[in-house]
Image (cartoon, rainbow, N blue to C red):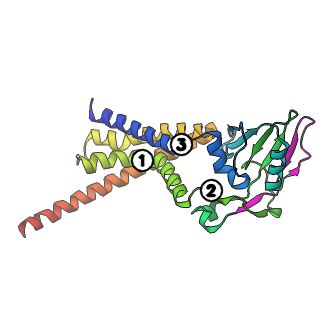
Amino acid sequence: MNDTARYALILVITYALLFFLVNADFSAKSRWYDEAAPWLGEPPNELSVETVRANLAEETPITVFTIPASDEWKQKIISAYGLERSIYADDATERYVCLMGLYPIYPKEKTYLLEPYTSSAHVPWLKVHQDGSMSFCPNDYNEYRDPSGEKFSKVPHPEYRENRYVHFIKELTAATLCFLLPGLFCCIGWLWVQRRPIQSRTTVNICLLLPVVVGIIGALVDFYIHGFSITYCKIAAIIAAFSNALCALVLITITAAGRWLWQRIRPKATTA
């Protein structure tokens, strides 16, 4: 096995392991604790979940929970989010929604690090089907929000929120995994750890081409699994290719500059 194939194998294994760790628990209960538990507490029995794929690049996939028939849970959801019955429903379905948008207020220690700059009003909705079973979305990112009447509400169960620093590390890891890891992994391993020459075809293959290819494939798989549209996945893949190529070029440049400087300093140090 040549050097390029060996790096490709190790990089793919490392990428897959980190991807699994970041997305290890994607179960219904885990997602409930992430998205609904701060409002509703412990999940109901026989809970199931579905990721509704976005159809357009400007849309975002949404999480929809399915809950067995329960008048108690129906009233609990309506009360917690302040939902109102929608006139846009058919005879077989009751629909409750908060079209004005609901802006959650968390205690300072439970507010995520970048949340004040990235958060927006939530639009939760509840559909009650003819058999009493319910479809519940804690936040439909694609639903219309009326900015003139956003409601601010303290979240009743903030203790279910993840530690703000743990959340930040996870988000940073996920972003690095997709957009920088291949370039960092290959350049640091090949040029810094093994101290291989910069001007070689193998260096171009390992430090530039391989990160771009793995970045593209990784982004396509990652964003598709998480429910984004095909168009959005392609855009993410292009961004991943560009970011990994830029990362590799920066590291190659830094390596070349560092080696050039060391060659100028070393003779003086030896003479002294």
State which quadrant residue 7 falls in. top left
- As measured in the structure, the alpha-carbon distance from the residue carrying label 2 to the one carrying label 3 is 17 Å
The label shown at residue 161 is 2
Query: Which quadrant holds the C terminus?
Result: bottom left
Q: In the picture provided, is 257 more to the left or to the right than 263?
A: right
Query: Which quadrant holds the N terminus?
Result: top left
Residue at (64, 45) in percent of width and height: 31
Callout 2: few (<14), some (14-19), or many (20+) C-alpha neighbours within 10 Å?
some
Q: Residue placed farthest to the bottom in the image? A: 272
Residues in magenta, as a range: 84-105
Nearer to us in this view, 30 or 260: 30
The relative height of residue 16 versus residue 198 in the rendered view (above or below) is above
Total numbered labels: 3
Nearer to us in this view, 214 or 227: 227
Q: Give the residue type that dot 1 points to.
A: Leu
- As measured in the structure, the alpha-carbon distance from the residue carrying label 3 to the one carrying label 1 is 16 Å
Residue at (45, 43) in percent of width and height: 18
Residue at (69, 55) in percent of width and height: 38
The residue that mark 3 highlights is: 23
Q: Give the residue type that dot 2 points to.
A: Arg
The label shown at residue 135 is none
The residue that mark 1 highlights is: 181
Q: Give the residue type that dot 3 points to.
A: Asn
